[in-house]
Image (cartoon, grey):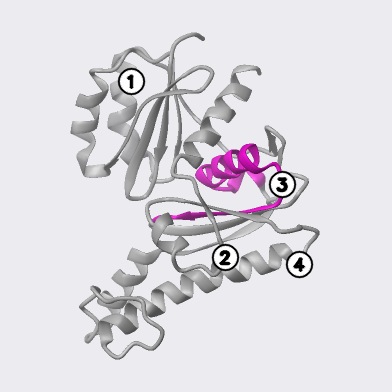
Amino acid sequence: MTGPILLLDVGNSRVKWALVRQPEEWVAEGTCMHDEADSLLGEWDRFPQPARVIGCNVAGQGRVHDLYAYWQSRNVPVRWMQAAQECAGVRNLYERPEQLGNDRWAALVGAWARIRGACLVVSAGTAVTIDALNARGEFLGGMILPGKRLMQAALVAGTHALQDMGGQTVDFPRNTADAASTGIATALACTVQKAYQRLTATDAKSPSCILTGGDADWLAGQLQFGAIIAPRLILEGLLIMSREDAQK
C-alpha cells in the first residue's frame, strides 16, 4: 500500500502515536491520556488519510473502541500486531511466544534494529518491563514490576502515614516523603541493574541498555551506568513489524 502509516501504541495510561511516510519520514507524532481521546480524534482529522493503522494495545479492547470506530469511519484498515516466534532478526524464546505483551515485543524489535547486539530493553511506564536480548537477537526473557506511580499509589492506599509523595531521592532520607521517593527509585534502579548484571554474565559483552516510556528520563538518572533514551522505541518496532507483515 502507498501512503503514510499511522502507528499506535496504546498503553495502560496513554496513547502514543506517529504518522510516518515511507521509508521513514516522521510527519507528526503525539501523546495523550486515555480521557483525552476526543481531542486526539480532532487532531487526526487534520492529517492526510493514512493507508493503514498499525498498533499494539495492552489497555484492553474497551480503550481502543473509539479509535477503531474512528478509522473504520474513514475506511482505513486497522491491524493490531501480536508477538510472534520471530520478526526482523529477533527470535522469541518465551515459553508461549504469543503470550508476550505486544508492546514488549515491538520494543525488542525496535531495539534490535538500533543495536544489533546484546541489549537490556526497559520500558518505564505504568508498569516497568525489563527484557534481555542476547548478541544473536534472541529474547531471553524478562521481568515485570510496578512502575513509579503504581508504587506511589500502593503506598498511599496501603498506609496511613505516607500521603505526601513530593519527596526527593537522597542517599539517607531524613523525612517521610524523601524516604518513600528514595525507596521507590532505589527499588526500580536496583532491579534494572541486577538484570543488566545477569545479561552481562551470559555471553553478552558490554550490553547496551535502552530506556523508553514516560519515566525513562527519570529512571536513567537513577542508574549507575549510561543508557540510551528512545522515546519512539515501540513505534519504531511497530514500523518494522508493519513492513514484515506487508510482505507476507
Task: Give the residue type that dot 3 points to.
Answer: Gly
Residue picked out by circle 3: 117
Q: Measuring from the top left, give residue 56's x and y in whole percent.
A: 46, 37
Q: Which residues are magenta?
A: 97-125
Q: Residue at x 65, y 41 (%)?
A: 112
Q: Is residue 160 left or right of residue 65?
A: left
Distance from the alpha carbon under mark 4 to that under mark 1: 47 Å
Determine whether the residue tagged by mark 2 lies in a helix, strand or loop: loop
Q: In front: mark 4 or mark 1?
A: 4
Q: Measuring from the top left, give residue 233's x and y in whole percent.
A: 50, 41
Q: Residue at x 27, y 30 (%)?
A: 66
Q: Is residue 142 left or right of residue 126?
A: right
Q: How many marks?
A: 4
- Give residue 201's mark: 4
Q: Is residue 126 left or right of residue 117?
A: left
Determine whether the residue tagged by mark 3 lies in a helix, strand or loop: loop
Badge 1 crowding class, 10 Å Cα cut-off, few under 14, some 14 to 19, many 20 or more, is some
Task: Give the residue type that dot 4 points to.
Answer: Ala
Distance from the alpha carbon under mark 4 to that under mark 2: 16 Å
Q: Measuring from the top left, give residue 34's x and y in whole percent.
A: 26, 43
Residue picked out by circle 2: 225
Q: Is residue 55 left or right of residue 209?
A: left
Q: In front: mark 2 or mark 1?
A: 2
Q: Residue at x 32, y 40 (%)?
A: 63
- In the rendered image, the residue lying farthest to the front is 226
Quadrant of image for the C terminus? top right
Q: Going from the N terminus, do you reach mark 4 or mark 3 first?
A: 3
